[in-house]
Amino acid sequence: MKQNTLATAAISALALVACQPAQQQQPANEPAPLGLTAEAFGTDTVDGKPISLYTLRNANGCVAQFTNLGAKLVTLFVPDADGNMADVVLGYATAAEYAACDNATQKGEPFFGATIGRYGNRIANGRFSIDGTEYQLCQNEKTNSLHGGNRGFYSQVFDVKQQGDTAITFSRISPDGEMGYPGNLDVAITYTLTDSNSVVISYKATTDKPTIVNLTNHSFFNLAGEGDSTINDESIRIWADAITPVDAELIPTGELMPVDGTPFDLRTAHAIGDSLASQHPQLLLGNGYDHNFVLSSPAGQDGLRIAAQVSNNQTGRVMTVYTTEPGIQFYAGNFLNATQKGKSGTLYLFRSALCLETQHFPNSPNIPSFPSVRLNPGETYSHVCVYAFTTIKK
């Protein structure tokens, strides 16, 4: 199996971060043993294309399931400190429920587990310029463009390529002008489930015209298990000395705000709920945490840096995030509102899950001081994100 250098290095490095072996307790309706399997994900089609559910299982009994609709992570079973398995990502039970989500009216949550593109997060007024040419994007959050527009990658059907027994690749060509973006963008996203209980996501993209790219994954995690009522009791640590503060529309102001003395100082572990009663202006604007953290940890030779770590003392589960990107969006489920019924039949409550989206900064095309998101013909966009699962004693 061929993999890009960064992903290979990530897998090798994380083999040292071993999780306790799982007991022989299997998730309900678990498909086949080791290897990649596929099955229909309901009877519906999207854009005339069939939607399938793909399953990977590692040697420890961890199970990851994906769909070609939005290249989404649908299910992720990992062990707790006693070896008991639970699904730790939010999602829906059928492809039809994913497809029915209407981002424009917020009738559902279209981003559960999704690949986000062409641009993760927000672009002010849905506009940016390249070499003097202005491009108008789909404006799907008031006047702004959010997560690629109302037909972003999360709603598109991807082609599927098997990458051996441990990985799956989703690919598509986003045509020139899709959601207003220039260039034909050739995209591939590879998910690898390692025997060290890590999900490695490797993104690649090329273009035939200068464009902008900022891909990420929008999985919602709860380490107590999908359907648990809160993440306020989970502890979080983020390796960041600053955030990019936002205005009332959650668009970065262009400044860097040091985290010292603020609720955003998560350089040591804090319970997520500890600071949410704060009257800090940035928390009020975001209705809680919904901010890009500027990572300060050094990158290793493989380009990966540690970005964040979440732990749940009740289950002993720990998730550590590594990335090649300069930022990470910490979103604490502020828009979950008990109207989204999950795959287990449970309503997803306010702040019952969190997202840690590795990324370049929001609105970077319009803020020259931010790291560039420009991609030119002949270049390759590359981004690796790792969600590594371990355990601690309860």
Image (spheres, grey):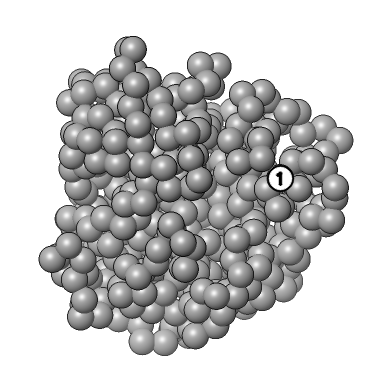
Question: In the rendering, at what x and y percent does residue 328 appear?
Answer: 56, 41
Q: Mark 1 points at which residue?
A: 285
Give the residue displayed 56% in from the left and 79% down from the top: 347
Left or right of 391 in this view: 12:
left
Question: In the rendering, at what x and y percent does residue 95 appear?
Answer: 30, 73
Query: 312 or 134, which is in the foreground?
Result: 134
Name the quadrant containing residue 306.
top right
* Quadrant position of the C terminus in the picture: bottom right
Q: Please, which residue is most extreme toward the front here?
A: 143
Left or right of 105 in this view: 178:
left
Q: Is residue 58 above or below residue 181?
A: below
Tell me if I can see residue 84 in this picture: no
Q: Is residue 132 above or below residue 254?
A: above
Query: 216 or 340, which is in the foreground?
Result: 340
Q: Please, which residue is most extreme toward the top here?
A: 132
Q: Which amino acid does label 1 sit on?
A: Leu
Give the residue displayed 78% in from the left and 60% down from the top: 273
Left or right of 311 in this view: 59:
left
Question: In the rendering, at what x and y percent does residue 227 appear?
Answer: 57, 77
| Total numbered labels | 1
Determine whether the residue tagged by mark 1 lies in a helix, strand or loop.
Answer: helix
Tell me if mark 1 has few (under 14), some (14-19) or many (20+) residues whose alpha carbon lies within 10 angstroms of its own.
some
Tell me if I can see residue 45 in this picture: yes
Q: In this view, does 172 lie above or below 78?
A: above
Q: In this view, does 151 lie above or below 165?
A: above
Question: In the rendering, at what x and y percent does residue 348 appear?
Answer: 57, 74
Give the residue displayed 21% in from the left and 49% down from the top: 171
